[in-house]
Amino acid sequence: MAELVPVEPFDIVVFGATGDLALRKLVPALFHRWCDGQIPAESRIVAASREDMPTEKYWDLAATHVLSEDSSDNRRARWKEFLAHVTYVAVDATGAGEGWPQLARALDDAENKIRLFYLALPPSLYGPVCKAIGAHKLNTPNARIVLEKPIGSNFHTAREINDSVGEVFPENSIFRIDHYLGKETVQNLLILRFANFLFEPMWNANGIDHVQITVAESLGAGQRASYYDRSGALRDMVQNHLLQLACLVAMEAPSSLDADAVRTEKMKVLRALRTVDESSVTRDVVRGQYQAGAVDGESVEGYADEVGHDSQTETFVAIRAHIDNWRWAGVPIYMRTGKRMAAQRSEIIVQFKDVPHDVVGASNAGTHPNRLIIRLQPDEGVKLMLTTKDPGPGGLRLRYVPLNLSYAEHFDKDYPDAYERLLMAVVRGNLGLFMRRDEVEAAWRWVDGIIQAWDDGQSKLYGYPAGTDGPTQSALLLATEDREWFDAFSA
């Protein structure tokens, strides 16, 4: 495993500290980086939320997400050491109340230290929080702010949020987080493409038939139901996660791995995406909603029953996208995401074109197209699917087999997870793993076209049983072009 390099001492203020994201992801991530020695002892963590409680009560609340009954004595001892750096402050995120002066006092002895503000809050509060930070002069020259997705609900609200945050923080201090960009296999995608001569000569319309991007969840809306019913799969997943993955697959080689060089190339992909509107939405987009079914052998109710009313919110979406430039002309990018699908999995499949002439013939079942499979979760890894001869006598038999790079088998499994990596990247000021303002707004412009077409009644909402891979119409999206979704996990 690569050596872990400690970051500079920093203070981090986590707004929304009693929420699910902070307790389930952020606090454990900071604790793990502390245990590995990446966070210096001079660093401080300020948990901020509206509820009034003593710091000790917050410690107990956070412990339920970090410790378990079988936690070792060493882990409990390290947790106790970690808590010595954690303070809780009751703060009204809208800027009202007495909490802000108390927060200012907690930070006023370290104006020159790196200061992080993490907004684990609804996007509607981003502007008010930033305004309060500025009013209390907490935005020091070394201050940075982290914004969780989604940033807005459409292009106009995203621009309003970006404007209000930009009034307090300069662009190079704003870190718009998408945790998919912190995953090891996503980071490796750029290296796989641009550090290996094998792929780049055929990474274009001459060599690639199509690309599939799947982010499937087996869980339902659950505790996020009230938010999700206002959002849906398109806003919640496509606008950020799936489009970011598409950009990394399709971008041109940057001049370097400098943050703006990479983000500028991603921006070119977003600008080249063919608009989906009322004339093409029924042809290129399938939307669905899960119904009652079974997941992992357990019966589950449908989405409408889960939220308690009839809803037109999509829990599944599949899109055939086109990038109108020379590299990708005529190569469809298929994207799909949904809840209550057959399995929890995220993967990118790059399918290369068939060989020009099949020398083995149909009598030997022919050859299969080469596929590059990048698994983001679970079981991170990379597979290159090849056709080879099955050893043994009795004639020529072919087998479709993978060259397999399993992260679990080849690397130390104890590398940082996405949030751990991204938090340390913010401290270091590495913007390359985060979205730039124009990326966010360009992605919303493209998604807004689909939403507008849906609002105009140009798309049907198809049902699909929970525990399946979405509506039948999703398969037809590919079948009309003699293609099919490839199940990488059975390969």
Image (cartoon, rainbow, N blue to C red):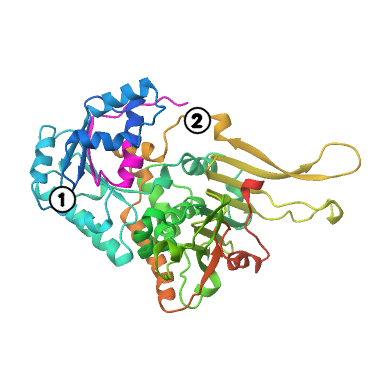
The magenta stretch spans which residues? 1-27
Q: Quadrant of residue 65?
A: top left
Residue drawn at the location 50% of the way across and 73% of the way down? 281
Element carrying mark 2:
loop
Give x and y (percent) for residue 323.
51, 62
Residue drawn at the location 55% of the way across and 73% of the way down? 283
Q: Earlier in the sequence, mark 2 or mark 1?
A: 1
Residue drawn at the location 25% of the way across and 34% of the way down? 59
Element carrying mark 1:
loop
Q: Is residue 479 magenta?
A: no
How far apart marks 2 and 1 lie (CA) works out to: 40 Å
Res. 430 visible in picture:
no
Q: Which mark is residue 92?
A: 1
In this view, 391 is above or below 315? above
Q: Quadrant of residue 33?
A: top left
Give x and y (percent) for residue 120.
28, 48
Task: Name which residue type carries label 1.
Answer: Asp
